[in-house]
Image (spheres, rainbow, N blue to C red):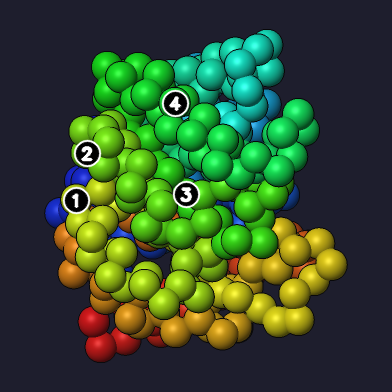
Amino acid sequence: MTAEAVAPAASRPLVSRLSLNQQTTKSWSLAEALDGCRRHGLESVGVWREPVAEVGLDEAARLVRESGLRVSSLCRGGFVTAAAGPERARALADNRAAIDEAAALGAASLVLVVGGLPADAPRDLVGARQRVADALGELAPYARERGVLLALEPLHPMFAADRAVLSTLGQAVDLAEQHPAEAVGVVVDTYHVWWDPQVLEQVARAAGRIASFQLCDWLTPIPAEALMGRGMPGDGHIDFAPLVDAVLAAGYTGDVEVELFNREIWAADPDEVVATMVERWHTLLSGR
């Protein structure tokens, strides 16, 4: 079975559009993740660049083709908030390389985590956001030429200083709208946007630009290592139904990833984690 034999997500029922983001089963190699997806009846996978680099791009592309799975996203590009100079040049070059990798893998999108405040301007939030816009101006044409959709991911405001100066879906849509829809879209990640009182309005506004949809829950207490606080859907505080319904109403037809950064989940048996993920997915879709 080849990737070419697999129908696109849009032609399949929502129940078959669940995707395993590789971070959820971090201990699995790319080959193990692809095998695990097939073993559990999944049709797509969200790939990270580091496991691709471990085997090399050509081998990774071969493994993906032979698996017959869709690549729902490649993570990640971004981190483009540095001022002019060698660091910024390196960041732009790395993003062009990521775009090439996404094209080779046939990924539905390349997720961009745009970066936090740079060391040389640790309080210049306005300037950092402008440098993200400037970087998109350079990268979007390159991505469009290669048929790659850049997916801007806003992160919860607690990550604004060190990971993403885009904190709301509205900010991401503002930037995306400056470019053709086939070049730049947005990520709706429930963990990062559930708190926003305008999120449903902004999801509707993002119609035609939702490039990726990710599910994970918000756990309390927040761990000391805040990045590791993502929970399996159903284990935390997020009301998923309104967000899922809003994304579908906005016309999203792609796969839906579960992306978990959680050390307890990473230490568990990956097969048990995926089995739970699939069970929660069917519970979430009950009545849909």
Q: CA distance from mark 1 to mark 3?
A: 16 Å
Q: Which residue is mark 4?
A: 134
Of labels 3 and 4, earlier in sequence is 4
Amino acid found under the numbered disc labelled 3: Glu
Q: Which residue is mark 3?
A: 153
**Residue 41 to residue 277: above or below:** above
**Residue 28 to residue 266: above or below:** above
Write the residue at 33% across / 55% down. Answer: 255
Residue depth check, mark 1 versus mark 4: number of the one nearer the observer:
4
Amino acid found under the numbered disc labelled 4: Asp
Q: Residues within 10 Å of mark 2 (few under 14, many from 20)?
A: some
Q: Is residue 92 left or right of residue 121?
A: left
Write the residue at 75% across / 74% down. Answer: 222
Amino acid found under the numbered disc labelled 1: Gly
Residue depth check, mark 4 versus mark 2: number of the one nearer the observer:
4
Location of residue 281 by image quarter: bottom left
Of labels 1 and 4, earlier in sequence is 4
Q: Quadrant of the C terminus?
A: bottom left
